[in-house]
Image (tube, rainbow, N blue to C red):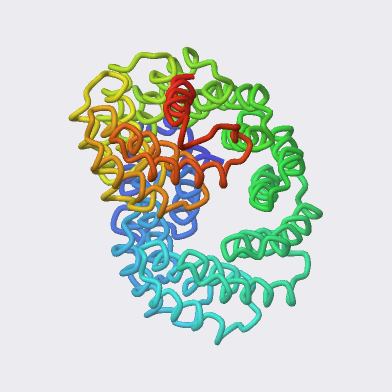
Amino acid sequence: MSTEDILGNTDNDNIPHGDEDSFLKSQNGDKKFDYETLEEIINIYLEENKFEKAIKYCDILIESYPYSAEAFHQKALALDGLWKYDEAIECYDKALLFNPTDVELIINRAITLDSAGKYAAAMESFDKALEIEPNNTEAIYHKGLSLERQEKFDEAIACFVQLLEINPNHADAYYEIGYCHDFIDNLNDSIAAYDKHLEFNPMNYNAWYNRGIVLYRQGKYLKAIESYEMSLAIKENFSPAWFNMGNAFSSLGRLHNAIECYENSLKYKKEDSMSYFNIGHAYEELADYKKAVKYFDESIKLDQNSWDYFFSRGNSHFSLGNYRKALSDFKSALILYKDYADLWYARAETEVALGKTEDALKSYQKVLSLDPEDYEAWYDYGNLLSSINKYELAADAFFKSIKANQYWAEPYFELSKIYFLTEETEMGIEMLEKGFEINPIEKFEYNFKEDWKKVLEFLIFRKRT
């Protein structure tokens, strides 16, 4: 039924179109308006989410019936629909002056308080409703939802369990229990709750989707994919399920399947930078760096504030030998995340490739200030210092690399080179012996003391190849 059904056809009854207020006043004169007609009009507007119009009629109703709790209740609902929570609460309070034990009023007031983030007051209101009706499932359910929003998941679960003791067939209670258990890492309990919900409501695509997320967190990627497929069988255009199924395929190393899922996600959510990014990352893992760059370009067009987008595109440019573009991307990423050691490391390697030795040394120093235990960075830093004949500093870097990882042979071999080049033969032989102790596969027969030049030639050749 529409408002025209209640008021009559506007043409036949000479009602000015869009001005039902004037019509009601003209029909009633100084008399009070018909309560039931006004209330029905308000309910229709509330159902149609036409809250402004509902409020107009509520005001007419309140003017005629100023002691009506229901009139204030309906106005509160309309204000709540417009997110005018403080005004809605005022109307609930006025309604409760006339009907202080109306449980529905008290519950709706609590829900509005919860929406306004006034959780303590909301809890008081829910508890007041439950004092009057201890088994009111609506109050228990919404109290549980409020506790959930406050991240008091154990208390929320207790509410939903209490609700199920009253009504064992309350499907939504099982759904919320599953949701809460997921947040507190009770993953098996979460799956069990979602399964129970799906017995009652097998067509809830969100439940299948959430179940898939929990299975993914358990590392059960194939089962997660099955759950996402159920969600998509119900709602094919549900892009989050496509996206997360892509993540599951990616975790299985099935990158082409993952790409297909991300592409499907983009069909229904065209401007999703993460889908473009994940496709780019998949192509990067497939060593198809040109395609990777293409998709990273799209992700950056949509979101220029994600450092990892620039970082990943920079890595692909580096793999393609586009060092200037790679360096530009790493610099852009560092503007967004200046204290990430891996970014500085990537920048240093790119500067080395471009022959920017002084810049690279500074970048390595930044890496090591952020992560002094990065033995590979110490090693690369040492190599760069050695290449410009700063042997003492290079040796210090190699020793720090060894200190950070005493089971890696490479720094010993590089130290041996330095000692041979500086004619410290005994130390060079000692470093070689230590290196070969760690990595005996590369051991070979030489008289170190007599043939150290051959050893050095071998090491230099080995380094170049």
In the rendered view, would you say 256 is above or below 220? above
Instruction: Name the residue at the front extreme.
Output: 450
Residue drawn 69% across the image and 74% down it: 161
Spot occupied by residue 300 in the image (x, y as percentages of width and height): 35, 25
Residue 340 picture location, percent across and down: 32, 44
Q: Specify the farthest residue to the left.
A: 358
Question: In front: 83, or 69?
Answer: 83
Relative to residue 300, is residue 129 depicted above or below? below
Q: Quadrant of the N terminus?
A: top right
Asked whether the viewer can see residue 366, the reply is: yes
Query: Looking at the image, which is closer to me, 111 or 298?
Result: 298
Q: Which of the pair 259/44 is nearer the observer?
A: 259
Q: Residue furthest bottom?
A: 131
Q: How many marks?
A: 0
Above or below residue 253? Residue 427 is: below
The answer to whether 97 appears left or right of 208 in the picture is: left
Query: Residue at coordinates 56% horizontally, 46% vertically from top-left?
Result: 438
Q: Is residue 16 visible?
A: no
**Residue farthest to the right, as pictured:** 199
Image coordinates for residue 136, horizontal then vertical, percent: 63, 76
Residue appearing at x 38%, y 32% in the figure: 14
In the figure, residue 390 lies in which quadrant? top left
- Please indicate whether residue 386 sits to the left or right of residue 132 in the image: left
Q: Percent from the top left, x then y, of residue 316?
A: 43, 21
